[in-house]
Image: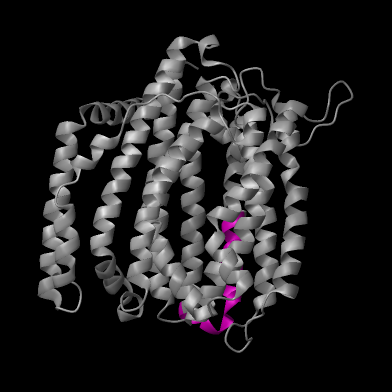
C-alpha cells in the first residue's frame, strides 16, 4: 500500500471517527439531561466518575501499550506472534480488574446505600465489562491495521445506541434499580462491541470469494486465536519490549489524563453530587477535543506508523514518504492550532450561556462557567499535544520512547500568524458581560447573534488566508470519498 493510499485511508478513518464522536456526544448529552430528571446527582457522580474511572483505568493499563506497539509493525510483521501478544491483554485485564476492584470496594469511601444502591454490584460488573472488551482486542487491531472503517462505525454505533436505549428504558420505568441500570447497560455495550468484530471476521474469513479476505494476513478465524509452536517464540520480543516501553509512558499519561477523577476519587475533595455536576461540565468542555482531535490523533498515528520506519534516520528513508509525512504534520498542526484558538475565544465568551441553557442555574451560577472557560484554554493545549504526540510516537525508536525524547527536529513552520485569523475576540469577551445571562432571553439572543456573526467572519477569514490548509482538507476529503467508492 503506497503512502498516498495510506494517507487517504487515514483521512477516511479520521472523518468516520469524527462522525462517530458527534453521534456519541449527542447521545451522551441528551441522555445526561434525561437522567438528571429521574435520578439523583449522587448516582450520576458515582457512575460517571467513580465507576467509569475503574473501567477506563483497567482498559487503559491493559491495552493501550499493546495497541501502539502492535499497530507499529511493518510489512514483515508476523501476525501470529502479534495476536499472541494481544491475547496477553486479557489476563492483564483480569489482574487490573481484580486489583482495582478491591481498591474501589475496600479502600475508597462507600456511598450510602439508601442514596446510591447496589454500589458493590456496579464495581464488579464494570470491572467485568472491561475484561469482556479485551476479548475483542486482536480483532480490533486487525481491523484498524486493515482500516476497516465501516466495521468500526457499525460496531461502535450499534453498541452505544443499544446501551443508551437500555439506560433510558430502565431509568424511565425502574429508576429504583439504581446502579443495576448502568451496570447492565455497560456490560451490554462491551458484549455487543466484541460480538460485532467477531461476527464480521467470522463471515469474512468464511467467504472464499471476498476480495478483502485476500489482503488479510489470516485465512481462517482460528488464526486470530493464541497459537503455540516450537519452531518460533510465542511473541515477537522486539514488539514485546516496545510494548513495555509504551506502557511505562502511558502509565504516566493515564494519571495526567484522568487526574481530576483520581483526585476526586481518592482525596474526597467533592461529595458525590458535586462530582456529578463537575462531570457534566467536564464533558461539555471536552466535547470538541473528543469530536475532532481524538479521531485525528488515532487515525493519523496509523498513517505515520505505516509511512515512516520507526527509529530510522529520516535521511535513510524514502524521501517521498518523509516529505509527505512532513507536509501532513504541518497541516495537522495548523488545523489543530486554528481550531483550538477558535474554541478558546468563543468558549470563553459563551461558557455561561451554554451551561445555563443545558442545566439551568445549577450549572451556570456557581463555579461552572470558570471551570468551562479554563477547559477551553486546556483544549488549545490538547490540540497541539495530540498531533505532535501521534507523530513522535509513530516515529520514535524504543530507546526514544523509553526517554520520551526524539532527537530529530520535526518539520513545520511558524504558526504564530494564525492568531490573526480570529476577529472580534476582544469584543466577544467584553459583550458577554452585558448580554449573558441575567438579562433575559432577548439579551441572550443578541449574544448568540453577535457570536454567529463573528464565527462567520472567522471561518471566512480562514478560508481566504489559509489556502494551503484548505487545500489539504479538500484533498483528504476527496481521497476519502474515493476510498469509500472503491472499498
Q: Which residue is outermost to the right?
A: 230
* On screen, residue 182 above or below 199: below
Residue 178 in magenta stretch: yes
* Location of residue 415 (image quadrant): top left
Task: Look at the image and name its color scheme.
Answer: one colour
Give the x, y percent position of residue 416: 28, 36
Q: Percent from the top left, x then y, of residue 185?
A: 56, 65
Residue 141, how many percent across, how many down?
A: 61, 36
What is the span of residues highlighted in magenta in the rendered image?
Answer: 172-190
> For the view shown, which residue lies furthest in the bottom direction?
114
Image coordinates of residue 41 in percent, x first then y, are 47, 80
Report the magenta stretch's main SS. helix
Q: Is residue 477 left or right of residue 407?
A: left
Residue situated in front as seen by the camera: 104 or 233: 104
Q: Quadrant of residue 131?
A: bottom right
Name the residue located 51 percent from the left edge and 47 percent from the top edge.
Answer: 155
Is the residue 229 above or below the residue 365 in the image? above
Determine which quarter of the picture holds residue 138.
top right
**Which part of the image, by quadrant, shows the C terminus?**
top left
Amino acid at each position: 500500500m503506497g503512502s498516498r493510499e495510506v494517507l487517504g485511508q487515514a483521512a477516511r478513518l479520521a472523518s468516520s471517527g469524527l462522525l462517530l464522536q458527534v453521534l456519541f456526544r449527542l447521545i451522551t448529552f441528551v441522555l445526561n439531561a434525561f437522567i438528571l430528571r429521574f435520578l439523583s446527582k449522587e448516582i450520576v457522580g458515582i457512575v460517571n466518575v467513580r465507576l467509569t474511572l475503574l473501567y477506563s483505568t483497567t482498559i487503559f493499563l491493559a491495552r493501550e501499550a499493546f495497541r501502539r506497539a502492535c499497530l507499529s509493525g511493518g510489512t514483515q510483521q508476523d501476525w501470529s506472534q502479534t495476536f499472541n501478544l494481544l491475547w496477553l491483554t486479557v489476563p492483564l485485564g483480569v489482574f487490573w480488574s481484580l486489583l482495582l476492584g478491591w481498591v474501589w470496594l475496600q479502600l475508597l469511601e462507600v456511598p450510602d446505600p439508601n442514596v446510591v444502591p447496589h454500589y458493590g454490584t456496579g464495581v464488579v460488573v464494570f470491572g467485568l465489562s472491561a475484561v469482556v472488551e479485551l476479548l475483542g482486542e486482536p480483532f480490533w487491531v486487525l481491523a484498524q491495521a486493515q482500516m476497516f472503517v465501516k466495521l468500526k462505525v457499525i460496531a461502535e454505533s450499534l453498541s452505544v445506541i443499544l446501551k443508551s436505549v437500555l439506560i433510558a428504558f430502565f431509568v424511565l420505568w425502574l429508576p429504583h434499580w439504581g446502579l443495576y441500570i448502568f451496570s447492565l447497560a455497560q456490560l451490554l455495550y462491551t458484549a455487543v462491541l466484541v460480538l460485532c468484530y467477531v461476527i464480521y471476521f467470522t463471515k469474512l474469513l468464511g467467504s472464499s470469494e471476498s476480495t478483502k479476505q485476500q489482503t488479510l494476513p489470516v485465512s481462517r478465524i482460528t488464526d486470530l486465536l493464541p497459537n503455540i509452536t516450537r519452531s518460533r517464540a510465542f511473541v515477537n520480543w522486539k514488539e514485546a519490549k516496545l510494548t513495555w516501553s509504551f506502557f511505562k509512558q502511558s502509565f504516566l499519561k493515564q494519571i495526567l489524563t484522568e487526574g481530576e477523577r483520581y483526585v476526586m476519587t481518592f482525596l474526597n475533595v467533592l461529595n458525590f453530587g458535586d462530582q456529578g455536576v463537575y462531570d457534566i461540565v467536564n464533558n461539555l468542555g471536552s466535547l470538541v477535543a473528543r469530536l475532532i482531535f481524538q479521531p485525528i490523533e488515532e487515525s493519523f498515528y496509523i498513517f505515520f506508523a505505516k509511512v515512516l520506519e520507526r527509529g530510522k534516520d529520516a535521511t535513510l528513508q524514502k524521501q517521498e514518504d518523509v516529505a509527505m509525512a512532513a507536509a501532513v504534520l504541518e497541516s495537522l498542526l495548523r488545523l489543530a492550532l486554528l481550531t483550538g484558538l477558535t474554541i478558546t475565544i468563543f468558549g470563553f465568551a459563551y461558557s455561561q450561556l451554554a451551561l445555563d441553557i443545558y442545566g439551568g442555574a445549577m450549572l451556570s451560577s456557581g463555579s461552572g462557567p470558570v471551570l468551562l472557560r479554563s477547559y477551553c484554554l486546556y483544549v488549545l493545549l490538547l490540540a497541539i499535544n495530540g498531533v505532535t504526540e501521534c507523530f513522535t510516537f509513530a516515529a520514535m525508536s524504543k530507546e526514544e520512547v523509553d526517554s520520551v525524547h526524539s532527537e530529530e527536529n520535526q518539520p513545520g513552520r511558524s504558526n504564530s500568524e494564525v492568531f490573526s485569523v480570529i476577529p472580534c475576540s476582544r469584543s466577544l469577551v467584553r459583550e458577554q458581560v452585558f448580554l449573558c445571562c441575567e438579562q433575559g432571553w432577548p439579551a441572550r439572543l443578541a449574544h448568540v447573534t453577535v457570536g454567529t456573526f463573528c464565527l462567520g467572519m472567522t471561518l471566512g477569514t480562514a478560508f481566504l488566508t489559509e489556502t494551503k490548509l484548505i487545500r489539504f482538507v479538500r484533498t483528504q476529503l476527496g481521497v476519502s470519498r474515493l476510498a469509500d467508492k472503491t472499498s
